[in-house]
Image (cartoon, coloured by chain):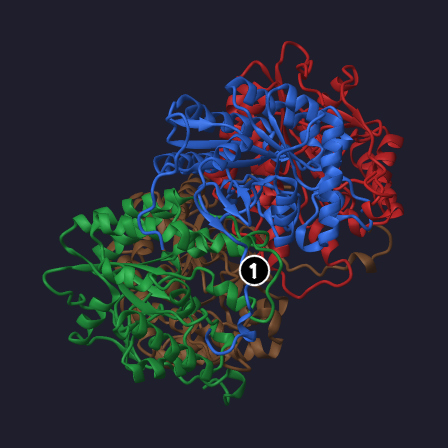
Chain colours: A green, B blue, C red, D brown
Amino acid sequence: MNWNPTPYPWPDGYRAAACFTVDVDATAPWLWQHRDKIPSGIAALEHRQYGMRQGLARMVAMLDRLNIPGSFFVPGIVAKDNPDLLPGLIERGHEIGLHGFYHEIVSETSDAQFTDALETSIELFVAQTGARPAGFRSPAWEMTPHMLSELRRHGLWDSSLMGHDLPYQIDGVTELPVRWDNDDAIFFKFLGAGDRPPRSEAEICARWTHEARAQIRDGGLFMLTVHDWISGRAARVELLSDLFEPLCADETVWVTTCGEIARHHLSVGGLEVTSQTVTPINERTGHE
Amino acid sequence: MNWNPTPYPWPDGYRAAACFTVDVDATAPWLWQHRDKIPSGIAALEHRQYGMRQGLARMVAMLDRLNIPGSFFVPGIVAKDNPDLLPGLIERGHEIGLHGFYHEIVSETSDAQFTDALETSIELFVAQTGARPAGFRSPAWEMTPHMLSELRRHGLWDSSLMGHDLPYQIDGVTELPVRWDNDDAIFFKFLGAGDRPPRSEAEICARWTHEARAQIRDGGLFMLTVHDWISGRAARVELLSDLFEPLCADETVWVTTCGEIARHHLSVGGLEVTSQTVTPINERTGHE
Amino acid sequence: MNWNPTPYPWPDGYRAAACFTVDVDATAPWLWQHRDKIPSGIAALEHRQYGMRQGLARMVAMLDRLNIPGSFFVPGIVAKDNPDLLPGLIERGHEIGLHGFYHEIVSETSDAQFTDALETSIELFVAQTGARPAGFRSPAWEMTPHMLSELRRHGLWDSSLMGHDLPYQIDGVTELPVRWDNDDAIFFKFLGAGDRPPRSEAEICARWTHEARAQIRDGGLFMLTVHDWISGRAARVELLSDLFEPLCADETVWVTTCGEIARHHLSVGGLEVTSQTVTPINERTGHE
Amino acid sequence: MNWNPTPYPWPDGYRAAACFTVDVDATAPWLWQHRDKIPSGIAALEHRQYGMRQGLARMVAMLDRLNIPGSFFVPGIVAKDNPDLLPGLIERGHEIGLHGFYHEIVSETSDAQFTDALETSIELFVAQTGARPAGFRSPAWEMTPHMLSELRRHGLWDSSLMGHDLPYQIDGVTELPVRWDNDDAIFFKFLGAGDRPPRSEAEICARWTHEARAQIRDGGLFMLTVHDWISGRAARVELLSDLFEPLCADETVWVTTCGEIARHHLSVGGLEVTSQTVTPINERTGHE
């Protein structure tokens, strides 16, 4: 137990940091879900194309207006199907990162499949942009020791886990922690019967504002994650603008990309953990 | 990617549009759900008859008071069981549209059944009103290539998909996009154990007001969808009135029917998409 | 369609009515759920006994303070296990009504079982209070033609269905309509994993206040339903007091029991409906 | 029925009481859930380690700042894996209590397993702190007659049931009642798809404030329960501080540990109940 933690050493006089990140899923999770057979109904597919047709451009225009560099995690298939997406983001000063090829759900993917999707995506990013991506975010924010090992082999940072408020190292990989609470999908995603009705934008934005302020007072990292087809709607982009405008205006807050923070963290050190090898209780001897 | 979209050319100096639409489901979804066997319990059936007994008239009186022309999508069986419904709506200056015969759920309906339900409904509408309906809305907002093909064959516009904020063409059919977020059923519908408890009217109406304003600022189309037996309650009709009153007072907003917008869109052009033929991932060769 | 309904003729210059009703379920639904085998865990049973130990007395004290006569629907087993419950309620000027013997869920109960539970409960009420109860409310608000027929045979009014805002007749039985939206259980009931987390009292009470005001403006009946072990908590009783205090202070609102309204309705007439005999769609010939 | 209850005799002129309790679950429920086989995904495990890495220290610092003695219920395995946890809590003036060894879910645990987990935990607590714990809280707040019997045998008080607002005796064990409504997990816990999206901190804190005030006006006990990895986040600790600050400032409220209240209750007496032996309805003769 670290009863009295010391403040994290942010650079250049900053006392906290904030990232605006976008998981550009588009139709990739739908393709993965229906990887064996395409259903006849097209409603979900149309809905998910909203971001590429309208939502992402509106979101990017807002970031440009506030002069915020965003971090965009793009599945390989989305980059492939929209060849001007990655170049357009880079041209506007944003960061791009990896996010699987077909947004592969980890529990449904073998180690070999993960490695293949990772390498194919890297090749595609290089082909489309001329540069290797530096970071990764796992689809649905699951992670395995194999995945961490592969990220380490490729020298990639990660942004998928929730074990801290601050950057840390896990299995030698720099982790920029996310939080479900700061994700739009769990509050707004709705694709029909069975899904939970969306919450109010005003409520969630007030919640995120509250969270951001508390994180800043605490000297932490406020990491927001939104999606192209979910938060690209007009009312949501307005509220995201309202959320980040005061952060941008606060000179003590470093509003930057995941990559910039990962680079900074290498010079800082701090918490290092390993993904534990856990023995199931029922294989233990007594209460070991 | 269309990074810098141009504003939609609304007519007559308007800069945005709004539609008040009603899916007059009444007992039709219950009849479809229990199409093989009628349960002994009558609670849900009584509940669903609320609209025909009281709710719809209250809603229509409100629209008439605000001088809003509504678009009412009526399943054939509801028109048949309430023969003064369609004539009464038309007499009051509202638009009527198709909505299946028994509110057939798309995934449970064959192509032939859809065609039959569509044609039977058109005949019924003609018999009751003397005119062919011009538009269609799919039950539960699902759509297939076959359905789009049939709508095109009959020269009908559609209002069931979510791929844009503005009217667009899909497979040659004019689409007036809907949104789950602007539907009352996902927030208010409650028929007993298992359903999610209704959200507060004040919260949802504030949410819709927020959404309407953002859409208007963005030059878009605010499409609201409510149901006879859900939103015909006194408190909800009051809030719907509060929602639309400022839209009606705003001279830059075109508060009109789906049909009027569909007719306008034909002279405008704009986005044209096709319902994609997608190959399942597992039938692809490599990461094509 | 009744496009222009006339106002309901409330007595004595009142223009609307309100009822405070309590479904005194206590442990009855738990006994019914576990009618074959009692589980070893006692948490839910303890939780459900809260009303008899503390909650109901607090609620009754509040009603007495506001001088509101409440309508209490009590399963036979709850009256039997708490023999001073019915006499104590009557002594304080409240109305008591039937609510099954073991809170039998309708879909799990045969017609004969319903009749037996009804008659046994009537006998018990007579034995404990010296008078026959006049009204009935169905457990979980389900109803069948057989149940309506039995109520008519016993001359009982009913308060279980949702087909209107105002009293009506169904199969010759006077119906005092309820609404899920004005029930506490769907918002507050929580017995552990799987249940939906309770909503905020302030939100729900604001919602009910809003609903009550709209119903009153519309000349309708505001029927609230709460439960002994759910709404007997201190904060909830305070909010229920806040909800009803303005209704009691409004001289145009008739705050009374279900029984009083049922008696009045007999002299009024109004909507009469029958529980429909519906043919399943798949047994119909064409789109009849 | 106790229609006119007398006020509870709080000591020293207090008219109500409040407890801040923490169920320090950390990874224990995950270990129990996966007791046969550890999954490859590490996201939930990382998430649950947040409390031990950061959240609990932040929460304890807040309690120390407000000078509130908290009651911390710690599963044996969490104490074992974090050997400075119990000593650190005691050193800071807080109370520690038992909470199973592996957070064993009661319905999945035999009587013998419960007894074993209880005794092993007591031994561990003695070894780490030099003293026997005085109180117990059941994992997931379930309880059986066997468990109550074992607590009585060990002279432990309990804090797991919901049958009253005030301390009471059940099977001879002093019960300090909890409430789902005053638990953070049901509102905030989120570990991925399938869980319900977290509610807003501001809403829940307003709700708890409202509840605390009503309980105090009613002369009752306000028992709050939070979790290390859930409520240790910066924004939540701030709100918990806002919630308890006015309680601490109110001289009529006894803000203390469960143990202090349990000791006081022994001199007071009051409600005594027994865990009932219930006959299933279907084994009863008639409506007994």
Q: Which sits in the foreground, D181 or A68?
A: A68
**Where is residue C255, by image quadrant?**
top right
**Where is residue D153, by image quadrant?**
bottom right
Q: Chain of mark 1?
A: C
Instruction: Give the labeled residue for mark 1.
Output: C193
Q: Quadrant of the N terminus of chain C?
A: top right
Answer above or below: position of C259 versus A133.
Answer: above
Q: Most extreme residue toward the bottom, as rendered?
A: A285
- Image spot of residue D82 (x, y percent): 34, 77
Q: Most extreme residue toward the left, as rendered?
A: A12
Answer above or below: position of B57 versus D107.
Answer: above
Answer above or below: position of A176 versus B167.
Answer: below
Q: Which sits in the foreground, B187 or C157?
A: B187
Q: Which residue corresponds to the image point at 74% horizontal and 17% vertical from the top-left?
A: C264
One can see residue D19 in this view: yes
- Image spot of residue D100 (x, y percent): 49, 73
Answer above or below: position of C266 versus D97.
Answer: above
Kind of residue sitting beneath label 1: Ala
- Would residue A122 appear left or right of A49 to someone viewing this image? left
